[in-house]
């Protein structure tokens, strides 16, 4: 059974999401700030539970650091970590284009230099990562573009970054998430007159349905 968006954000707040879904949630919260309060509340609840937990001794028998000391150490590490935006490129700044900052950082190059690959008429893709059974990619779809009816052997999470997409009876715009599992057959289409950019995280294989789909599956292997 596919998880709900609420369950996804709860897992993200608890630090239990995969790299791809963590990126998707961070980008979602950038585009849809209304959800930040909910995630912050969950994180504060988790911190309170950790704060109230007893401090255990390490293997040497010495007491481990306090919760406040742990937070101070984490803050110090974050401050010392180079900012990927500030250090990127000769100009020192990352051209994110229409991408939210977490996605631009994951891409790691100027938006205008992304090497898009043709996938279907009006649809191109740039793979950010494909490792450990999880594929993270950007999709660029021009107005009128359609993805043929398909299903998945695993889960698919799509975040609309710009533009608008219709998936069944639901219309998705910037900041909206669509979650699909093996039980879903769908065929998203781009509506409106704006190029639609999406962040897509997939586990498992995508399988096209129908006569045309069987031909497309030869290229999806």
Image (tube, rainbow, N blue to C red):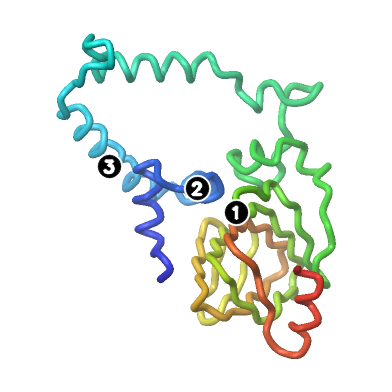
Question: How far apart are the two marked residues, 3 and 1, measured between alpha carbons?
Answer: 29 Å
* Residue 191 visible: no
* Marks 3 and 1, the one that precedes in the sequence: 3
Position of the C terminus by quadrant: bottom right
Callout 2 environment at 10 Å: few (<14), some (14 to 19), or many (20+)?
some
Q: How many marks?
A: 3
| Badge 2 vs badge 3, beta-carbon distance below 8 Å | no
How far across and down, in percent of the image, does residue 209 sit? 67, 84
Quarter holding residue 84: top right
Query: Which residue, given by chain and number where applicable, does mark 1 sit on?
Result: 134
* Marks 2 and 1, the one that precedes in the sequence: 2
Secondary structure beneath label 2:
loop
Quarter holding residue 174: bottom right
Measuring 56% from the left and 64% from the top, which residue is drawn there?
156
* Residue 107 visible: yes
Q: Is residue 213 above or below residue 59?
A: below
Measuring 35% from the left and 58% from the top, which residue is drawn there?
7
Query: Which residue, given by chain and number where applicable, does mark 3 sit on?
Result: 41
Secondary structure beneath label 1:
strand
How far across and down, in percent of the image, does residue 155 sit? 53, 65
Nearer to us of marks 3 and 1 is: 1
Callout 1 environment at 10 Å: few (<14), some (14 to 19), or many (20+)?
many
Secondary structure beneath label 3:
helix
Q: Is residue 74 above or below residue 199?
A: above
Query: Which residue, given by chain and number where applicable, does mark 2 sit on?
Result: 18
Quarter holding residue 120: bottom right
In-image side of 97 versus 1 (left or right):
right
Question: How far apart are the two marked residues, 2 and 1, measured between alpha carbons?
Answer: 8 Å
| Badge 3 vs badge 1, beta-carbon distance below 8 Å | no
């Amino acid at each position: 059974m596919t998880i709900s968006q609420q369950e996804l954000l709860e897992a993200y707040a608890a630090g239990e999401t995969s790299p791809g879904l963590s990126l998707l949630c961070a980008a979602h919260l950038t585009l849809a700030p209304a959800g930040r309060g909910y995630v912050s509340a969950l994180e504060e609840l988790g911190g309170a539970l950790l704060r109230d937990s007893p401090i255990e001794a390490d293997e040497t028998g010495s007491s481990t650091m306090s919760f406040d000391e742990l937070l101070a150490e984490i803050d110090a590490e974050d401050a010392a970590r180079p900012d990927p935006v500030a250090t990127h490129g000769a100009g020192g700044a990352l051209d994110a284009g229409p991408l939210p900052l977490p996605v631009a950082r994951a891409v790691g190059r100027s938006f205008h230099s992304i090497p898009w690959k043709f996938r279907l008429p009006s649809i191109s893709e740039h793979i950010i990562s494909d490792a450990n059974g999880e594929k993270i990619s950007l999709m660029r779809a021009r107005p009128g573009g359609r993805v043929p009816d398909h299903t998945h052997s695993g889960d698919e999470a799509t975040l609309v970054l710009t533009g608008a997409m219709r998936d069944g009876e639901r219309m998705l715009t910037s900041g909206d998430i669509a979650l699909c599992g093996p039980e879903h057959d769908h065929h998203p289409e781009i509506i409106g007159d704006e190029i639609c950019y999406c962040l897509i995280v997939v586990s498992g294989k995508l399988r096209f349905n129908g006569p045309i789909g069987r031909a497309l599956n030869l290229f999806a292997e």
